[in-house]
Image (spheres, rainbow, N blue to C red):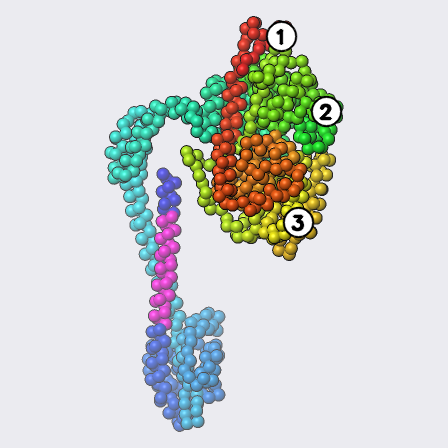
Amino acid sequence: MRFFQLRLVAAMLLGITLISAISTYFDVLAHKHLLRKDLQRRAQWFAVGIRPQLERTLAEQAATNWSEELRDLHSSPDQPAILLYNSRGEVLGTAGEMPAPRMLPGRILNRAFDTNAESDAFVRVRDTNGTAQQWYEDVLPLHGKQGVNGALVVLANADWIRAEGVAMWQRSFWRIAAMMVVIVTVTLTMVRFFLYRPIQRAAEWLRRVRHGEANAEEGVNEFGYLVPLAREVTSLAENLRKAREAAKTEAVLRNQAEGMWTSERLAAHVRERLGNGKLFVVSNREPYAHIRQGRETRCITPSSGVVTAIEPILLACDGIWIAHGSGDQDFQHTDAKGRLRVPPHDERYTLRRIALSADEQAGYYEGFANEGLWPLCHIAHTRPVFRASDWEYYRAVNRRFADALLEEMEDTEQPVVLVQDYHFALVPGMIEQARPDARVAIFWHIPWPNAEAFGICPWQAELLDGLLGADLIGFHLQSHCNNFMDTVDRVLEARTDWQDFSIRRRGHLSAVRPYPISVAWNQPASKDEKVVAFPHEPRSASWAGPTLDFIPNIKGQKVILGVDRMDYTKGIPERLLAIEQLLAEHSWYEEQIVFIQIAVPSRSTIPAYARLKTEVEEMVERINLHYQTPRWKPVILVQRQCNREELQHLYRRADLCLVTSLHDGMNLVAKEYLEARDDCDGVLVLSCFAGAAQELKDALIVNPYDIAQVSDAIHEALQMPPDERLARMERMRRHIKEHNVYRWASDIVTDLCAVRIQETPSQTSPGSERPARTA
C-alpha cells in the first residue's frame, strides 16, 4: 500500500505540474502580448502627436539646436525617448533615456527611408557593459516639399515586460505548490479512509472465508459502498467453497471425459494411473538447454514434439528426465551429478544431464545412430555405414544412460520408464536385467524396415535383444509393428504372438503397439468447432515482418512452403525438380508463385548431409537463374532454424505445404501446418511414404519419386476451389484435434501402467528369476 501511495503521489505531482506549467506558459505569453501591444500603441500615439511640428521645423530649418528643440517636445520622463535623423541618416538631436545611438540596429531606419513608410520592431541591444536589453523602436519618415527630409525615431524600453513575465511565473509557482499540497493531502486522506480501509476489511474477510471461518453473506458489510463489487466477490467466495468440495470429483470427471486431450487432462490422467509412483524419461534431446549468447547465458527450450508431450507427465508426478547435456553452459547450472530442477522459476521435476565427450558424440550419435541406424530404417537409398568402433561407443553410451537411470531409481518401487527413440535401443534390456520390477516402454520414432533390410546391421540380434527388455514397444504405424515382429521372428529365438502382437523371450513379455504421434492442439476447444475467418494478412500485403526478415517481401504471390531438416530422407531435391517442372509446363505461374524451402542445417559433419546441402544449393541457383525476373525469384532457400512464432507465421501465409519425404515415421510438419491453419484454408500435399499419410486422407497424396505427379498435385492445389479446400482442411483438423500429442502420451502411459508384474513362481519362466509380465 505504501508503494501504491508513493506512485499515486508521484503521478499526481507530475500531472499537476505539467498541466499547470503548460497553462502558465500560455498565460504568460498572452499577458506579454497585451503588454507589448499597449507599449506599441502608446509609442505610436506619441510619435504621431509630435510629427507635424518636427516636419515644419525641419522644412524651415528654423532650429539650430535640435536637442533643445526635442527636449521641449519630450515633456515627461514617462514618455519614450526620441531621436531625429536628417535625410542622410545623421543624428540631429536626441531627448529622453536611451541606449547609445551607435548600438541601435539601423535596418529599421533604412527600411523606413526605403519604403517611405512607418516601420517598427522590438529589438534586443547590448549596452557598453554587454548587458542585453529589449527596446521598442518606431521610425516615422518626415516629409518636406522635396520629399523625405529625415526621420523621427521613438524608443521605448521594453525590458520591464520580460520582468513582468518572470514575476508572473514566480506567482504561478507558489500557487501551484500550494495547490499540490492541498490536492495530495485530500487525495491521500480519501484513499486511506474510502479505499484502503475497506480493502483491508475485505481482504481479512476473504482470508476467513478461505479458511472456512466466515460466511459469504458477511462480505456486503465489509465492502461498504462498493456494492457491485461486493456482490461479485460474495458470489466468488461461495463458488470457492463449492469448488473446494468438488475438486477431486471434477478432476476425475475431467479425466474420464471423452473430450479433447489437453496437457491438464493428461496430467490428471497420469496422476490417476501412477498413483504414488514416479516416471523416468530417457532421451537424447533435453527439454531445457543452457547456452551462451553474447555475454549472457540463456535457458532455451528446444523445439520438440516429444518435449511437449512428455513434460506434462513429469510435471504431474515430479519425475526425472535423463538426457544428453548438449548446451555449452549446461553443466554450469547443475550439481555434481548433473542434476537441476526445472522448469526455471517453477521447479517441479528433475533434469539429469549426461556429459558426452567429443569422441562419444561422434561415435554414438553421428556414427552408429545417424550414419548407421538412420539410413538403415529410412528406405531412402542411402547406404548405411556400420563401424565396429561406432558400435562400441553406442553400447558404452547406452550403458552410461542406463547406469544413471538405475541410480535415480534406487529408492523407487516399481518405477515407470519411458525410453525415447533409436539412440537407446539397448537401455530397456539393461534396465530389465537390473530392475525386473520396473515397467519399461520404448518408443521408436523412425520407421522400422522389413526384416531383409534390417538384416544389413551386423548387430541386429543385440539391438533386438535390448529392445525386447521393454514391456511395451511403440511405433508410429501398424506396418512398422509388423516389420518388427517379422524381424524378431527371423533373428531371435522367441515366441511371437501375431494375434495379441506380443513377443515372449526368456520369460519376458513385450507388447508391440502402434501409437501415431501428433502435435499439441493449443487452440480453444469447442464442441462444434468451425473457424473460417482467421484475420491473416491479405495476399497482396507485404508480409515479411521483423521476425521474418530472412524472407524478402512478397506481394500478391501464392506461397508454396516446405519445412524440413536438410536431410536426404526429406526429398528436397525431388521437390525442387517438381517446382521446376511446374514452371516449365505452366508459364503463367511466373511471378505468381514463390516456393519457400526452410532447410534447417543438420548433421553437417556427415558426408551424405554435406553432399545434399551442395546439391540443393546448386539446384536452387539453377532454377532461379533460369526463371527469375528483376522483381521475382521462384525459389527462396532458408538455411536456418526457425522458432515457433516464425513457423506459425509461415504456415498461416502458405497457400499449400509440401511434405514430400522419401520415407518418414510420421513427419509432424504436416500436422503442424494443419494445426496452424485456424482459418481452415490451405492445401497439404503429402508423401505416401510419410506415416501421416495413413491418417490424413484428405491431403493430396503423392509418390515423391514421381516428379510429374508431384508437379500436377501442386497445380491441382493452386487451382482447388475454396469450398473443397475448406472441407478437406476441416476434416483433417478435426482428426488431429482428437488425436493430438497429449492423447498419444496418455495411450502409452495407460498401456504401460496396465502391465502387471506377476511374482508368483508359477508365472515365472523356468530357469529364470525374473518376474513374468502380463499385459
Of callouts 1 and 3, the N-terminal one: 3
Magenta span covers which residues?
A: 11-36
**Badge count:** 3
Q: Is residue 63 visible?
A: no
Is residue 735 located in the magenta-colored stretch of the structure? no
Name the mark on residue 584.
3
Q: Amino acid at mark 1?
A: Ser
Residue 456 image label: 2
Residue 313, percent from left and from top: 51, 25
Give how far apart the Cα atoms at labels 1 and 2 are. 32 Å
Asked which quadrant contains residue 364, the reply is: top right
For numbered disc 2, what is the local secondary structure? loop
**Residue, x 56% and y 12% (percent of image)?**
773
The residues bearing labels 1 and 3 have C-alpha atoms spaced at a distance of 68 Å
Looking at the picture, does residue 242 appear above or below residue 75? above
Q: Residue at x 41, y 78 (%)?
A: 120
Disc 3 residue type (three-letter): Ala
Amino acid type, label 2: Ile
Identify the residue at horizontal 36%, vertical 80% (top origin): 44
- Left or right of 761? Residue 527 is left
Is residue 459 visible in the rendered image? The answer is yes
Q: Quadrant of residue 363?
A: top right
Q: Is residue 26 magenta?
A: yes
- Residue sitting nearer the eye, 762 or 7: 762
